[in-house]
Image: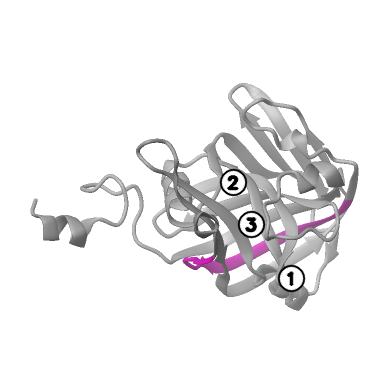
Amino acid sequence: MKLEDVRKNAFAMPLTSPSYPPGPYRFINREYMIITYRTDPELLRAVVPEPLEIDEPLVKYEFIRMPDSTGFGDYTETGQVIPVSLNGVRGGYVHSMYLNDEAPIAGGRELWGFPKKLARPTLSVDTDTLIGTLDYGPLRVATGTMGYKHIALDHEKILTSLLAPSFLLKIIPHVDGSPRILELVQYFLTDVTVKGAWSGPAALDLHPHALAPVAALPVLEVVSAVHILSDLTLDLGTVVHDYLKE
């Protein structure tokens, strides 16, 4: 393979059989259960990188079913998003993500810097309860429950929340192990259709684990919960801060 062919064909690894296709990526019937809880403010500040700022000690624990996604297929994801602001603009910092599909793990980490790790999350309905779980190896790490479709929510307010920016810390090491890329990345969801949105009573139980430390941001109080069904596009990102240029 000639030099120009390498430059032309290289967009993801492996070179001759990339783990995912080029984006953007469309999701159909993407389903969320998001439980917002209050946590310890000092522990929260310790994991949110500057220049992001925290207003309240809140965490959004998300369980997400993605049955139909471009290039990534059918998978489930869970993790923590922290409400933050950057230069006065409110958004969410993606702190942790656990999922059961190699393609979006590779694509999410390489393209945007999503903090994705391999695990076994689920999101399903059992009679009157929406249930989300996270297993890391044989151990149950997280369990979220919510009353199923108790109160319908305003779609416009949910749409506004989904259109807010999200932030990621992208880390790509050099061959000597030092960081070659260390950037704060911003991305948006686009072409969003809210098909349904509901609130209801909710509970969240997090268990300590050395390699899936979701309980390091402990649940002090459940504040609210929302169940969302939507179609959307995950757009590619932009760099808003380069830590290596300082």
Select label 2 or label 3 by which is in front.
Answer: 2
Task: Tell me the SS state at disc 1.
Answer: helix
Q: Residues within 10 Å of mark 1 (few under 14, many from 20)?
A: some
* Image-based side of 171 in relation to 224, left or right: left
Colour scheme in the image?
A: one colour
Residue at horizontal 63 percent and vertical 51 percent from the top:
64
Chief SS of the magenta region: strand
The percent coordinates of residue 181 (x first, y second) are 45, 52
Disc 2 to disc 1, how far (Cα)? 20 Å
Q: Quadrant of residue 224?
A: bottom right
Kind of residue at disc 1? Ile
Disc 3 to disc 1, how far (Cα)? 13 Å
From the image, tell me which residue sits under label 3. Answer: 31
N-terminal-most mark, 3 or 1:
3
Select label 3 or label 1 by which is in front.
Answer: 1
First to last magenta residue range: 223-240
Q: Nearer the viewer, residue 221 or 172?
A: 172
* Image-based side of 57 in relation to 245, left or right: right
The percent coordinates of residue 206 (x first, y second) are 77, 34
Badge number at residue 158? 1
N-terminal-most mark, 2 or 1:
2
From the image, tell me which residue sits under label 2. Answer: 77
Task: Tell me the SS state at disc 3.
Answer: strand
Disc 2 to disc 3, how far (Cα)? 10 Å
Instruction: Indicate whether residue 178 is drawn in magenta.
Output: no
Label count reads 3
Kind of residue at disc 3? Glu
Q: Residue furthest left?
A: 2
N-terminal-most mark, 2 or 3:
3
Residue 199 vertical position relative to residue 145 in the rendered view, above or below? below
